[in-house]
Image (spheres, rainbow, N blue to C red):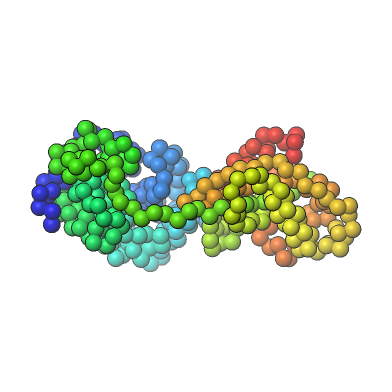
Amino acid sequence: MDENFQEYGHKLVTWYRQNRRDLPWRRTCDVYAIWVSETMLQQTRVETVIPYYLRFLSAFPGVADLAKASEEQVLKHWQGLGYYRRAKNLHLAAKQVCQEWGGDFPKTRDGWLQLAGVGDYTAGAVLSIAMGQPEPAIDGNVLRVMSRLLCIREPVRNTNVVRRIRKLLEYWLTNDVPSDVTQSIMELGAIVCTPRSPQCLLCPLAEGCRAKREGCAAELPVKVAKAARKKMLVSALWLEHAGQLLIEQRPEEGLLGGMWQLPSLSEERTEDGGSELPSALRLAESLMERLVAGSLLADEISESPQPYLVPVATEKHVFTHLEWEVHVCRPVGLALEKLFGQSQKRMELMIWVPVEDWDKYAWPRVYEKILEKLLSERVNI
């Protein structure tokens, strides 16, 4: 136990009560609402989350409402927030709560950890904030604040480091209001003890902060270097006929599972610099060949004049460990009327939908931006 730091928990709580931001999830003690907020706040900024949180609770005001919704509805209300696995797990966990727990939320950490997508942090956050239990919630924000307070120069994710921080947090939580303790550390990390340029002069813990005293706050926490992001080139086709657009659903498993996109093909890129358009066109040609080969009318279509591709849009998107560069092309001369309406047995994840109904489907943000741009310039499509 870091004996000299036991008193700082109460100092932090006092500061929090006087300085906390007015956030919608702080106006409720509802377990469901706080669970939704904590799920949305993972890897996402507060100002981004607020409108999504309010709309989501309006659409699904309780856990039973969420459990009864379709996955398509849930993903649609999550669209644009990113990290869609969170939404799918939240939906699945709501069903677990209703089917396995009779609609009541678990009362223990072990119980929460049985729910889909709930990890150690989320379990601790909901238990302490919504249920008043002295359970630590340790995320990157908390590790940063505590590593600076204690001036820990070891990698912050090391087991011994996390154990040391957890022990001090447990003391604070046991000796004060758990909800305020957990939220006070989050608040300090969000507005004062920030990743870059920490505002030590405003910190209620500055007097005892070892990192401030040693002048190394900005250098902490110590992290293990991340692997470089994988870069992917994505070629997509705009296939429109008689007011209908061909779209495809991504496989349920994996990145953006179950969401919709334009028919596409991707490959990993290793080269740096230069235009990716020639490679994107080559990929698009391969994709067209697959579409024709998958049609019931492949022979008839193959007799049509050779189509060519017109680039119509490009967009980049950065995920946590992945970068996409998406190029959209429009095939000119492809006999779409022969593809339209066919069952395309080898393309069962593709469907034709009215162009004006595109926003009824859940799209990754990168495709949403592309469609918004293209549909605002329909004269060029």
Q: Where 45 sits versus 72, above or below? A: above
Q: Residue at x 73, y 65 (%)?
A: 345
Q: Where 5 sits versus 89, above or below? A: above
Foreground pick, 331 / 16: 331
Q: Residue at x 63, y 47 (%)?
A: 326
Q: For this view, does 6 lie left or right of residue 352?
A: left
Q: Is residue 251 visible?
A: yes
Q: Is residue 84 visible?
A: no
Q: For this view, does 160 lie left or right of residue 4?
A: right
Q: Residue at x 31, y 47 (%)?
A: 141
Q: Where 362 sits versus 18, above or below? A: below
Which quadrant is the N terminus positioned in?
A: bottom left
Foreground pick, 358 / 334: 334
Q: Position of residue 10 (x, y in %)?
A: 14, 44
Q: Position of residue 67 (x, y in %)?
A: 45, 57
Q: Position of residue 215 (x, y in %)?
A: 22, 40
Q: Position of residue 86 (x, y in %)?
A: 44, 54
Foreground pick, 189 / 279: 279
Q: Residue at x 70, y 62 (%)?
A: 347
Q: Where 5 sits versus 102, above or below? A: above
Number of residue marks: 0
Q: For this view, does 166 lie left or right of residue 252?
A: left
